[in-house]
Image: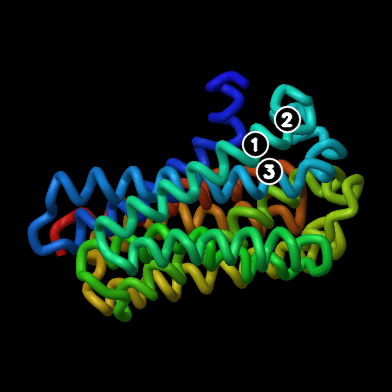
């Protein structure tokens, strides 16, 4: 088992974006940020998200083996055994939750809930049954932001829930735009992801609806004082571009336009959480 395979099992690029949301939330809203707490939080989120992702890969090995995009991952390519994946994932998850307890119980709870939503609700119960699975699974992606808020404030609160919901709702935008590009893969694997089981027009409508919901939640964050007006406008630019590309997909170059919408949606998430660090 190589470190590069462990890194691929944990999908570190995606994990890094989610961890960044939590770290940014802590630095933005803690009255007096502590380097010690920030490092503890960073380690806790990195390990808990990585462990959860590893479990996801473990349970989805059969699906990944059927999809061109994922068949070279460590498990379907047999570069890592299921036992190895289970050990490193369980160790990372347990260590992440325990480190979260050193910050406060709410940080640990956010890490544990991320596992419950992603593995129990999304991966094991909903993913192979309903195209709306991402709506529930998205709550797992919002847990690092909630954990960062909890580390900063010592509790949950409306602000933490708003940040969590922004990421949770954005997750469907992220997944559906990518799945529209790889719809044939999902059909081959028998996974009822929305773009694989409905028409292009309905997929575009769903993506635009989710983009509008993310925009509304972003404005709510501004009204709650979580982000400056300048930060809000900057963050909304790539979100608007994502929606524009999705709208164009209804008329031409469906897969290409959806992939561009996917890239812009990812840029929005990074910019929004960078923007909350600006003075409010």
Q: Looking at the image, which is closer to me, 119 or 198?
A: 119
Q: Which mark is residue 57?
A: 3
Query: Mark 3 and 1 residues: CB-CB less than 8 Å, in contact?
Result: yes
Q: Quadrant of residue 104?
A: bottom left
Q: Looking at the image, which is closer to me, 221 or 111?
A: 111
Q: Which quarter of the rendering shows the C terminus?
A: bottom left
Q: Position of residue 180 (x, y in %)?
A: 75, 51
Query: Mark 1 and 2 residues: CB-CB less than 8 Å, in contact?
Result: yes
Q: Which quarter of the rendering shows the N terminus?
A: top right
Residue placed under numbered mark 2 in the picture: 81
Q: Earlier in the sequence, mark 3 or mark 2?
A: 3
In this view, the residue farthest toward the top is: 2
Q: Secondary structure at mark 2?
A: loop
Please tell me whether residue 279 is drawn above or below residue 43 in the rendered image.
below
Q: Position of residue 106 (x, y in %)?
A: 33, 68
Q: Position of residue 247 (x, y in %)?
A: 66, 60
Between the C-alphas of marks 3 and 2, the distance is: 12 Å
| 280 lies left or right of 186 | left
Residue placed under numbered mark 1 in the picture: 85
Disc 2 packing (10 Å; few <14; some 14–19; many ≥20)? some
Q: Secondary structure at mark 3?
A: helix
**Residue 270 visible in image:** no
| 188 lies left or right of 94 | right
**Residue 23 visible in image:** yes
| 270 lies left or right of 35 | right
Of the two numbered discs 3 and 2 in the rendering, the one whose residue sits closer to the viewer: 2
């Amino acid at each position: 088992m190589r470190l590069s395979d462990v890194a691929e099992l944990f999908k570190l690029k995606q994990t890094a974006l989610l961890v960044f949301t939590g770290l940014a939330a802590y630095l933005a809203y803690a009255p007096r940020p502590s380097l010690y707490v920030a490092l503890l939080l960073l380690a806790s989120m990195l390990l808990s998200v990585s462990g959860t992702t590893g479990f996801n890969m473990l349970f989805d090995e059969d699906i990944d083996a059927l999809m061109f995009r994922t068949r070279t991952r460590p498990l379907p390519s047999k570069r890592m055994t299921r036992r190895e994946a289970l050990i490193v994932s369980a160790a990372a998850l347990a260590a992440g939750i325990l480190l979260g307890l050193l910050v406060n119980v709410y940080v640990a709870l956010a890490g544990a809930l991320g596992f419950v939503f992603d593995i129990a609700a999304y991966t094991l119960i909903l993913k192979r049954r309903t195209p709306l699975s991402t709506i529930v699974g998205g709550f797992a992606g919002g847990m690092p932001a909630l954990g960062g808020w909890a580390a900063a404030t010592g509790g949950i609160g409306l602000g933490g829930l708003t940040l969590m919901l922004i990421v949770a709702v954005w997750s469907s935008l992220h997944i559906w735009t990518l799945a529209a590009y790889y719809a044939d893969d999902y059909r081959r694997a028998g996974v009822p992801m929305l773009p694989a089981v409905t028409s292009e027009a309905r997929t575009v409508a769903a993506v635009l609806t989710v983009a509008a919901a993310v925009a509304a939640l972003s404005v709510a964050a501004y009204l709650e004082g979580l982000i400056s007006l300048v930060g809000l406008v900057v963050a909304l630019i790539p979100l608007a571009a994502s929606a524009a590309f999705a709208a164009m997909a209804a008329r031409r170059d469906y897969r290409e336009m959806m992939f561009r919408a996917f890239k812009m949606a990812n840029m929005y998430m990074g910019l929004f959480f960078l923007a909350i660090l600006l003075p409010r």
